[in-house]
Amino acid sequence: MNTPRHPQVAIVTGASRGIGAAVAQRLARDGFAVAVNYASGSAQADALVAELTAAGARAIAVQADVANAEEVRRMFDTVEAQLGRIDVLVNNAGVLKTVPLAEHTDALYDQTFDINVRGTFNTLREAATRLNEGGRIVNFSSTTLALNMPGYAIYNATKAAVEAFTHVFAKELRGRDITVNAVAPGPIATSLFLDGKTEEQIQAFAKMPPLQRLGQPEDIASVVSFLAGPDAGWVNGQILRANGGVA
Ligand code: NAP
């Protein structure tokens, strides 16, 4: 029997802070060489890389706006040149502004779709030809898709697109021995969730799940670690909600 090669090199998009930073830390602990992608947070990405390197991991920071196909291509080139061919792609980069649909501007609509949908499309397209056999792709959806709360129409639409990519792309990669799954977090205590909310609103979200707390970035990093690791080899084309039981 052939023993599958343990994946070695991972790219985590949007890893300068929030969930992505926790994913990069966890994958580095799991033994991956990690590319920490960021858009503008170079100081945070550099600090994270310094921390990972000090702990004995191989890590680099790579600037690329995931919404820009050429920058994404260059990011893959850089990672291949500096860390080697890629085994794991984590499509974590994403933005959220909760605005009622009727008040959404064209610019905000474009930005949300460009980063959440086109950004995921850009990296998946590169991954189709550049990921090693035995590789893993983990996309990011959101539990908000199941909650249908006011203010989330555009964001949820982008995450519905990501879920559609996940199901179809898993099938299009037939024969490559690459799994494609998505994690759909509930509320996680990062700036994406916390910014612009009152303490009262935050507490209301924290009380929603039967586990009665907000999720932490590490709660999601462990799910990504599972999907990227050896134990999830038979999980493919799935959306895994991680939300303390909220939906
Ligand atoms: P966050 O704290 O706001 O961090 C977002 C990260 O994405 C940052 O590292 C940011 O980098 C990066 N980023 C933004 N635009 C980018 C672009 N165009 N290209 C490359 N990187 C970009 O967000 P988070 O809460 O960790 O969210 C991570 C993912 O989880 C998102 O896909 C989000 O939709 C999903 N999610 C979050 C929650 C939650 O409650 N937090 C719930 C469900 C799903 P810079 O600092 O360089 O801009």
Image: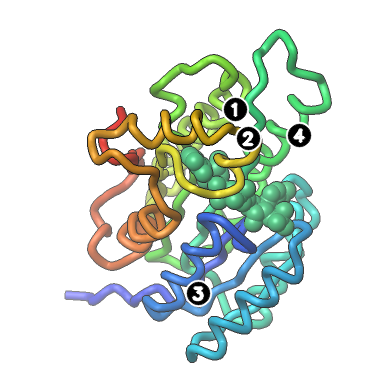
Residues marked 4 and 1 touching at CB (< 8 Å)? no
Q: Is residue 72 visible?
A: no
> How far apart are the alpha carbons under marks 1 and 2?
6 Å
Spot occupied by residue 3 in the image (x, y as percentages of width and height): 23, 76
> Is label 1 in contact with label 2 (beta carbons under 8 Å)?
yes
Q: Which element is circle 2 on?
A: loop
The answer to which of 197 and 101 lies nearer the viewer is 197
Q: 239 or 135, which lies in front? A: 239
Check disc 1 and report its element: helix, strand or loop. helix
Q: Residue at x 68, y 80 (%)?
A: 81
Dot 1 amino acid type? Tyr
Residue highlighted by disc 1: 155
**Camera sees residue 215:** yes
Tell me where residue 70 sits by quadrant. Answer: bottom right
Depth check, mark 2 against mark 4: the one in front is: 2
Q: Is residue 223 left or right of residue 200?
A: left
Along the viewing direction, whichever of 6 and 113 lies nearer the viewer: 113
